[in-house]
Amino acid sequence: MKNIIIFGAPGSGKGTYSDEIVKRYNMGHISTGDVLRAEIKGNTELGKIAKGYIDNGQLIPDELMIDILAKTYDSMPAGQGVIFDGFPRTIPQAEALKKMLAERKHEMGLMIELIVDEETLLARLLNRAKEQGRADDNEVTIKKRFEVYHNQTAPLAEWFEKEGIRNTFTWKGSKDVMLGEIFAFLDKQ
Ligand code: ATP
Ligand code: MG
């Protein structure tokens, strides 16, 4: 499979659909949020820096993220395609991803955009707070993450549009329906 960038607001299901896509097409998976949470758990230098930003609902600085992303990408099995979950989140990150892949003669592939209404997003994140206890899944931090998403990340959808790789899927109340639409699209690639 080509590389895939999965894109959407906090709680839009990037991780959930990525897991399903990875299984079906046997791809690599890079979740920058998971990479950072593992660093925090391991109490590494990077983890200590990341924690301050994540707990405040803010983005980790671009230079740091771009470096982490390139290292993680180079550690993935070659030739299977990778799904990027949670990266890029800013225009500089998107430009850096494109450049990093071009340097390796690889392509960005496809972007999958998940559109979900904010009421559903909030309900999902509050529910996840109960189930997984993520420090940033509390109402104050969630609101901040939505704001950061609208200001810094959402404008990237247009960037992907210009790249000619934007593919939008809209939540209509059922995970199976959404996943069916995504698989139908990816099967044709
Ligand atoms: P969900 O996983 O439900 O889609 P989310 O998008 O908020 O929600 P993650 O992708 O796990 O969650 O990211 C959690 C936090 O990690 C972000 O709020 C941010 O602080 C940090 N982070 C993750 N990826 C990046 C990135 N590409 N650039 C900067 N910060 C990032
Ligand atoms: Mg996630």
Image (cartoon, rainbow, N blue to C red):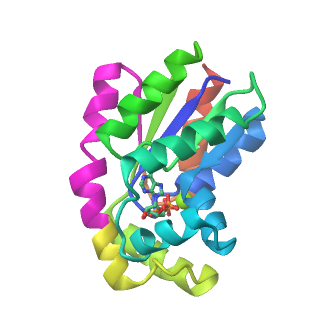
Tell me if residue 139 can be seen.
yes
Query: Is residue 156 or residue 131 the one in the foreground?
Result: 156
Residue drawn at the location 41% of the way across and 58% of the way down: 60
**Position of 50 relative to 140 (above/below):** above
Left/right placement of residue 176 relative to residue 161 reads right
Highlighted magenta segment, given as a residue range: 146-169
- Residue occupying the point 48% across, 67% down: 49
Magenta highlight: main SS = helix
Quarter of the view holding residue 151: bottom left
Left-right relation of 164 to 18: left
| Nearer-the-camera pick, 188 or 139 | 139
Q: Residue furthest front?
A: 45
Left or right: where 85 falls relative to 78? left
Residue 110: image x %, image y %? 50, 27
Report the quarter where the C terminus lies: top right
The quarter holding residue 161 reads top left
| Residue 163 belongs to magenta span | yes
**Could you say where residue 38 lies in the image, as x and y percent from the top left?**
66, 65
Q: Quadrant of residue 56?
A: bottom left
